[in-house]
Amino acid sequence: MTPSESEEKLWNIEFAVVALILFCCASGLAIFFDFHKYLESLQVPPSWIGPLIGADGLSGLAALLWATLMLRKRHIQRAITGGAVIFWLSLWSYLWVDKPLTILLVRLLHGCGFALLLAALTLRLSKAIPRRCSGTAFGIIALARLLPYAVIPPLLNYLSPGSLNFRSVVFFSAVFLTLLFPMIFILGRPKGEDSGTAVPHHSPRDLWRNLRQRTIAFLLAVCLLMQCSYVIVFFYINVYARRLNLSNPGLFFGVASLLMILTRLAGAALGDRFEKRRLVIQAHLPLLIAFGCLAVGRGEPAFLSAAFLFGVGWGVGMPQLNALLFDRSRPEFRGPNLNTSMIAIQVGFFLGPLGGGAILARFDYGVLFHACAVLSLLSIFLLLGIPRELQKERE
């Protein structure tokens, strides 16, 4: 750790505003918990539902690839503003589309705007987080992105029992997200911004060499696998619960998100005290049990037990995985590597619904959740293939 890092504090106006922006964006995404049901209410053909749910992940992937390779330091603030505008306009667009093709176009716009905003914010954050506080920092950021998921899905089940009320929810969400623009104004331009630079931070060849390192490659693969299983649960658990005649499917993510919040509040700094690799491996164990509960359980006890276990596993695993990637990256590649992890997450948002839809077209939900358990096992094997963190790396 350098002296400048040891003196640097985590909490500052830049970190706080970025966390608030991410909280607002997560609020605009959490309303899509009911998107599957809304598409069914529009009588969208079943073959379209999986691609429509995952389309924003595909466009987000393209936006993140561009940002990781080409986004220049002098363009970060413009990218934040542009991404926010696209994201905000896409939400308004949902109010007027009801055909598969037009919904697809809006989903592509939606994913592109959010991904561009997220990529630019990540580059800002990568320079503002001291390495000694990485576990705490990513715990706080994960908490900011999680809180809306703890509140909005249960509320949607109580306040909008009719599927067509989804448009009203979108309207109020778009109004709320107008707050993005004054916050972006407060954020301002990065300190020390060199407006004269005209080349990307790293050449594609340098970035590729960095990504080919075993530790970085394995961690990015774990990001992808973990996100695929998370997205499958997020998008398909509602319909699955209704087929089991459970009273409030939204309670699942309410319980899971509450446990994720409590876990992150209690242990945000765990990774700053213990080895992060071990913590992420241990976080996958409750996930394996949770997928088993969903695969073989048929009643509300198994359903809520799975939610509890998911909350613990995701609550510890997701932020510590990001912190582990941050720590194991060379300082000049921390921003690009974190954005590449976002690329993996966007791929998960596309492949998760697509793969889940393909499985459900031939099999039942038991097979779907068993497949998710296999993804968690693969993640554990990849994490075991990463060298343990040396003590000198933590100092």
Image (cartoon, rainbow, N blue to C red):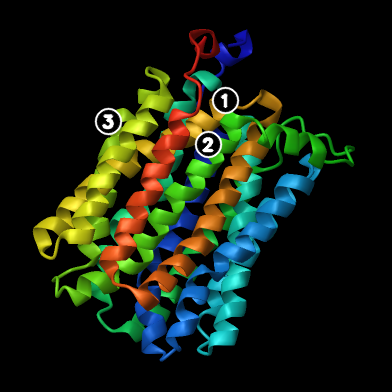
Q: Is residue 51 left or right of residue 307?
A: right
Residue behind mark 3: 266
- Marks 3 and 2 sit apart, C-alpha to C-alpha, by 24 Å
Sequence order check, earlier mark of 1 and 3: 3
Q: Quadrant of the N terminus?
A: top right
Instruction: Name the residue located 53 percent from the left edge and 36 percent from the top edge.
Output: 219
Label 2 near label 1: C-beta < 8 Å? yes
- Amino acid marked by disc 3: Ala
Q: What residue would you read off at disc 2?
A: 219
* Res. 238 image quadrant: bottom left
Report if residue 191 is visible in the image: yes
**On the image, which quarter does residue 190 sit in?**
top right
Residue type highlighted by circle 1: Arg
State if disc 3 and disc 1 touch (CB < 8 Å): no
Is 349 situated above or below 95? above
Counting every numbered tag in the picture gives 3
* Separation of residues labelled 1 and 3 (CA atoms): 24 Å
Q: Secondary structure at mark 3?
A: helix
Residue 328: which numbered mark, if any?
1
> Circle 3: is it few (<14), some (14-19), or many (20+) Cα within 10 Å?
few
Q: In this rendering, does residue 71 appear at all?
A: no
Residue 118: percent from the left, percent from the top? 59, 50
Nearest the viewer among 71 and 325 is: 325
Quick check: 284 above or below 83?
Answer: above
Q: Residues within 10 Å of mark 1 (few under 14, many from 20)?
A: some
Question: Percent x, y for residue 60?
Answer: 61, 60
Choose mark 1 or mark 2, whichever is in front. Answer: 2
Label 2 is placed on what type of residue?
A: Leu
Disc 1 element: helix
